[in-house]
Image (cartoon, grey):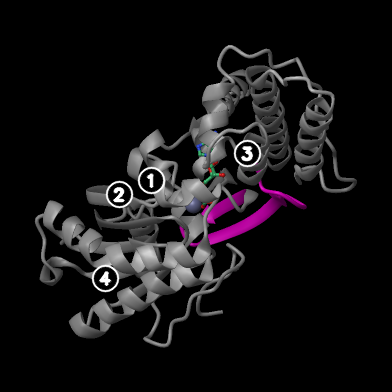
Amino acid sequence: MNTKILAIESSCDETAAAVVEDGRKVLSSVVATQIDKHVVFGGVVPEIASRLHTESISIVTEQALCEAECTLSDIDAIAVTAAPGLIGALLVGVGFAKGLSFSSGLPLVPVHHLRGHIAANYLAHPELEPPFLCLVVSGGHSHIVEVRSYTEMKVIGRTRDDAAGEAFDKTARSLGLPYPGGVHLDKAAQGGNPDAYKLPNPRIDGAPYDFSFSGLKTAVINTIHNAQQKGEEIPVADMAASVRKSISKILTERFIKCAQDTGYKTLALAGGVSANSELRSRMTQACEKYGYKLYVPPLSLCGDNAAMIGAQGYYELISGNTADLSLNAKASMEISKSFND
Ligand code: KG4
Ligand code: ZN
C-alpha cells in the first residue's frame, strides 16, 4: 500500500500544500506566493505574512487534495513545517495541521524546513539515498550538512553571520533591485563584468567549512554609497555579476573542500539560493572535475513548497517521528534535533 502525506508549509511568504506518495512522488503541489504583497515594503512583513497565510491556507489545501484526486480519507498522515521560520507564519500552518489531525485522527508529522529543502532532491532524483553531503542555502541559513540517513543530520559548516540568500537580498536591494533580491540580482548579472569589483572572501581560523558574508554585503553597500555621494552611477550589471561570482565561488570552494576532507562522493544542493545560475554551473563543473555525483533540485523545487515537506514527512513518519496535539512551532531549531528531543 502506498503512503500518502498531505503536507502544509507556511514558514515565510508562500502558503503551500501538497500531496506526496511514499516520499518520492508528487501527486499535487500548490504554492500561493505573497511576493506581490510584500514587494512594496522591500521585504517580508511578518504580520502581513501571517494574515495572508490565514486567508489562503484552507483554499490551498483544498486545491492540493482536489488536484491529487484525494479526500482526507485517502491520506495517511498530515506533515507540517514546524521550524524554523517566522513564528507567526509557522503557527498558522501548525495550528491548521493540528486541526486537520484532530478532526481526522490522522498522525501529525512535524518537519524541519531545511530537512524539507534537502528532501526536494528525493522528489527529482529517485536514485538518491543518504548518506550524502548537502549544501543548504536559503534566505536564513547557509549550512553544509552531512545527511547520514533520512532523519539523521549533522551540520559541519555554517555561516557565522548573514546567510547567502540574505547577502544576495541585501546587496540586490542596495542596487535598487526589487524583493526578493536573489533572483533579480541573478538576472541583472547577465552580461555584467564579474571581475569589475573585488569583494572580500574572509576565512574563519580553525573552521574551514564556515562562511561569513556580512563583510561582502557591507563592502557592496559602502561602494554604492560612496559612488552616490560623488554623484557617480554604479554599473548595476557589473556589481551584480561581481556579487554573484563572489558568493557562488565561496560556496563552491568551501563545499568541495569539505567533500574532499570528509570523503563524500555524493553531493547535493538545496534551498532557494540553489536556483542561482552561477552556483549551479560552478558546482556542476567542480563536481565533474573531482569525480563527484551532484544532485540539484529542479528550479520549481528550489524555493519554498509543500511537496518537499511531504517528502521529508514520509521519512519522519516511518521513523516514528510523529507529534501529539501539544506540538508548537519554533522560530529556530537545529537541523540535527528531532521535535521529540
Ligand atoms: O529557501 P527559500 O525559498 O526560503 C527560505 O527558506 O529562506 O530561499 C529564499 C532565498 C532568498 O534569499 C532569495 O533571494 C534566494 O533564496 N534566491 C536566490 C535565487 N532565487 C532565490 N538567490 C540567488 N539566485 C537566485 N536565482
Ligand atoms: Zn525555504
In the image, which residues are magenta? 144-164
For the stretch drawn in magenta, the main secondary structure is strand
Question: In terms of sequence position, does the residue under pointer 2 or pointer 3 come before the other?
Answer: 2
Q: Amino acid at mark 4?
A: Ala
Q: Are marks 1 and 4 in contact (CB under 8 Å)?
A: no
Q: CA distance from mark 3 to mark 4?
A: 41 Å
- Which residue is at 76% across, 46% downward? 210
The residue that disc 1 covers is 122
Q: CA distance from mark 4 to mark 2?
A: 15 Å
Q: Secondary structure at mark 3?
A: helix
Q: Position of residue 306 (x, y in %)?
A: 34, 55
Which numbered mark, 3 or 4, is in the foreground of this view?
3
Q: Are marks 1 and 2 in contact (CB under 8 Å)?
A: yes
Image mark for residue 24: 2
Q: Position of residue 290 (x, y in %)?
A: 63, 23
Q: Amino acid at mark 2?
A: Arg
Question: In terms of sequence position, does the residue under pointer 3 or pointer 4 come before the other?
Answer: 4
Quarter the N terminus occupies: bottom left
Q: Are marks 1 and 3 in contact (CB under 8 Å)?
A: no
Q: CA distance from mark 2 to mark 3?
A: 37 Å
Which numbered mark, 2 or 3, is in the foreground of this view?
3
Report the number of numbered marks: 4
Decide: few, some or many residues near mark 3? Use Cα within 10 Å; few <14, some 14-19, many ≥20.
many
Q: CA distance from mark 1 to mark 2?
A: 6 Å
Q: Are marks 2 and 3 in contact (CB under 8 Å)?
A: no
Q: Secondary structure at mark 2?
A: loop
The residue that disc 4 covers is 77
Give left or right: position of 171 versus 181. Answer: right
Whether residue 70 is visible: yes
Image mark for residue 173: 3
